[in-house]
């Protein structure tokens, strides 16, 4: 029961953080925090993309070093196009009793339509967790 409660909490936290980050990105409100731990991120320190990654990690509220983020666009960061913010986090057993059944990663993807383009956000991703990949995270094509 304890492990189920933690799994449910982590799932909700991940989804909410991704949703908040996507919403801030599509309205060009990236915040000011660019001082989080990014794993394998090849972007520019202090960039708008960097700030969105940090905002997502802050809003998820779990261990920042274990959170992985990806931002994907339909084509470019253009109004009325689709943006995807994807987040993964390792599944864990707090009690240890459920460890054989809890492995892999939580994954969530939030899609939103870009409203404002007053910032410069680029497609980027952190290194996926061990044994995972980002193939499931692709921005939808709008019509």
Image: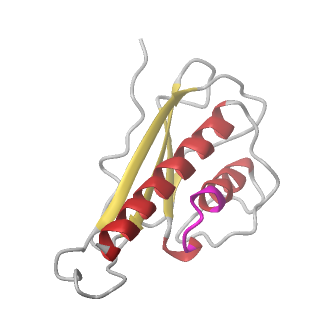
Q: Residue at x 39, y 28 (%)?
A: 140
Q: How is the image coloured?
A: secondary structure
The residue lying toward the viewer, choosing from 19 and 137, is: 19
Q: Residue furthest right?
A: 32
The residue lying toward the viewer, choosing from 97 and 65, is: 97
Q: Which of the 4 image quadrants contains residue 28? A: top right
**What number of labels is visible?**
0
Magenta stretch in the rendered image: 58-63
Query: Is 61 included in the stretch rendered in magenta?
Result: yes
**In this picture, is 98 found above or below 108?**
below
Query: Is 90 included in the stretch rendered in magenta?
Result: no
Q: In the rendering, at what x and y percent does residue 115 appear?
A: 66, 22
Q: Residue at x 63, y 56 (%)?
A: 59
The residue lying toward the viewer, choosing from 49 and 106, is: 106
Can you say which quadrant of the picture contains the C terminus? top left
**In this picture, is 28 found above or below 56?**
above
Q: In the rendering, at what x and y percent does residue 62 appear?
A: 55, 69
Q: In the rendering, at what x and y percent does residue 9 appear?
A: 44, 62
Can you say which quadrant of the picture contains the N terminus? bottom left
Q: In the rendering, at what x and y percent does residue 73 appear?
A: 50, 35
Q: Is residue 81 left or right of residue 101?
A: right
Q: Residue at x 72, y 54 (%)?
A: 51
Q: Residue furthest top?
A: 143
Q: Residue at x 37, y 82 (%)?
A: 94
Q: Is residue 114 left or right of residue 95?
A: right
């Amino acid at each position: 029961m304890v492990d189920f409660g933690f799994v449910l909490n982590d799932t909700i936290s991940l989804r909410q953080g991704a949703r908040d980050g996507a919403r801030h990105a599509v309205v060009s409100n990236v915040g000011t925090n660019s001082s989080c731990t990014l794993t394998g991120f090849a972007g520019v320190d202090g960039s708008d993309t960097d700030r969105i990654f940090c905002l997502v990690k802050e809003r998820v509220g779990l261990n920042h070093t274990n959170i992985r983020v990806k931002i994907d666009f339909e084509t470019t960061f253009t109004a009325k196009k689709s943006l995807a913010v994807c987040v993964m986090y390792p599944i864990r057993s707090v009690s240890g009793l459920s460890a054989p059944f809890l492995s892999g990663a939580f994954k969530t993807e939030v899609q939103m339509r870009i409203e404002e383009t007053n910032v410069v956000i680029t497609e980027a991703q952190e290194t996926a967790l061990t044994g995972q990949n980002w193939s499931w995270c692709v921005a939808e094509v709008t019509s």
